[in-house]
Amino acid sequence: MMDYLVYYDPDGTTCTRLIQDHKIDPKNLWVWDNRPTHRALLKVLSKKFGFTLIEETKWTNSFHLPPGEWNKLLLLGYDMKFDKILSNPPYDDSMWVKAMQQLPRLLKPGGEFQFLVPNKILTPFTKGATFAKENLSIDRIDLTYGKSFIPAIEGTWACNVVGGLGKTDKFPLTLPSGDVVETDFDSPNPVMEMDKVDFDLHHKVMRKDNKFIFHKTERIDSKYFCYMRPTPSRVDNKLRYQGIVNQFVEKDTVVGLTEKGKEIICKATKNGFYQVCKSKEQAERMLKIYTESELFRYISYCNIGFVMITRFNKEFLPNIEDCFYNSEQDVYNFFNINDEEIEHIQNVLNKSRDRHH
């Protein structure tokens, strides 16, 4: 008989379905959750169905820490391993990443896990994506699950991740539409707009051939450069990249006043990335394309949620030093964007963003 672990079960749905729908013997089912409200319900269900509700002190004393420390999720000192682990972990404070990091210690060789986690796991260079790539063998990721969680998890699109221990190269990704694409944790996977055309456009545009240089606070001595800040700005309720050209400011400086007397502050040039340019005109054109063109406002819209994604931008934004920008069509032609794709881009930019976006 296989041993099952339900690792976080907020409403008891997972353990109940395993017993009632999948006929799992309660003697082979263990459940752990350190949230007080969750445990109260799980205690009732444990008495009703007979599964083992693991005392939090057997894995961690986190339950006895101050409330702000409850979610450290260390799970130390428990030696049992399981054939199958199912989890719907908390999404706050990257708790889902900490939960996944326990899998090598809790899952038997050849065992299988299913985790409901934010689709941020698809974003390269994040902790979740990096851990999954190096420690887990992903069989599939399914984004259709997110539709069921929209009312309950504001700001997040959930996905079902299935696999075992190992390493991951390519894996099938089921999109919200039901279409399946092949991807990996090193590709520019959009997380805000997720139709097949969005994935196709990102692979077409995000060429990973730019000449950006990471920058913290050191002086930039190049005469001409295009500088991108990591934090998105919101213009007309649309998220866009920020940028500057041909100026290095060592500290925030007041450069004037608005008509209402409010200070106009020029922010220090720091914590971004830049490309050295041949001329002032080239730098200004590149900045305008990155920050104002329809295509790159769309790219920004598809990828920027509530976090800075500096590494993603730096790695994947394409080199546009030879792209003209007398019209939007110039940019579309540079990337061989067809009429149907242009229509899709314009529709995305014109629609209201769902609250989970």
Image (cartoon, grey):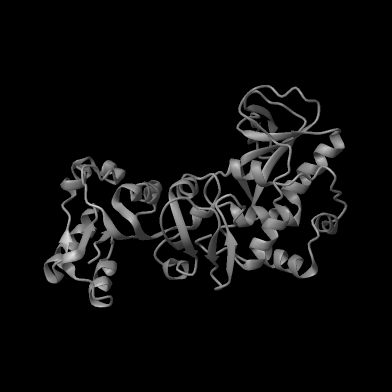
> Which of 104/185 is in front?
104
> Which of 274/159 is in front?
159
Q: Residue at x 67, y 57 (%)?
A: 202
> Which of 234/308 is in front?
308
> Which of 168/178 is in front?
168
The quadrant the N terminus occupies is: bottom left
Q: Does 169 sit left or right of 101 as displayed?
A: right
Can you see residue 157? Answer: no
Q: Does 283 sit left or right of 35 as displayed?
A: right
Position in image of residue 101 (x %, y %): 37, 47
Position in image of residue 79 (x %, y %): 21, 47
Please count the marks in the image: 0
Q: Residue at x 65, y 35 (%)?
A: 261
Q: Does 277 sit left or right of 98 as displayed?
A: right
Does 148 appear above or below 99?
A: below
Where, by quadrant of the figure, is residue 251 drawn?
top right
Where, by quadrant of the figure, is residue 248 drawn?
top right
The quadrant the C terminus occupies is: bottom right
Can you see residue 71? Answer: yes
Does 195 appear above or below 227?
A: below
Q: Looking at this rendering, what residue extends furthest in the bottom direction?
A: 21
Does 49 appear above or below 186?
A: below
Position in image of residue 109 (x %, y %): 34, 54
Does 137 appear above or below 66?
A: below
Q: Does 38 sit left or right of 193 as displayed?
A: left
Position in image of residue 345 (x %, y %): 71, 64
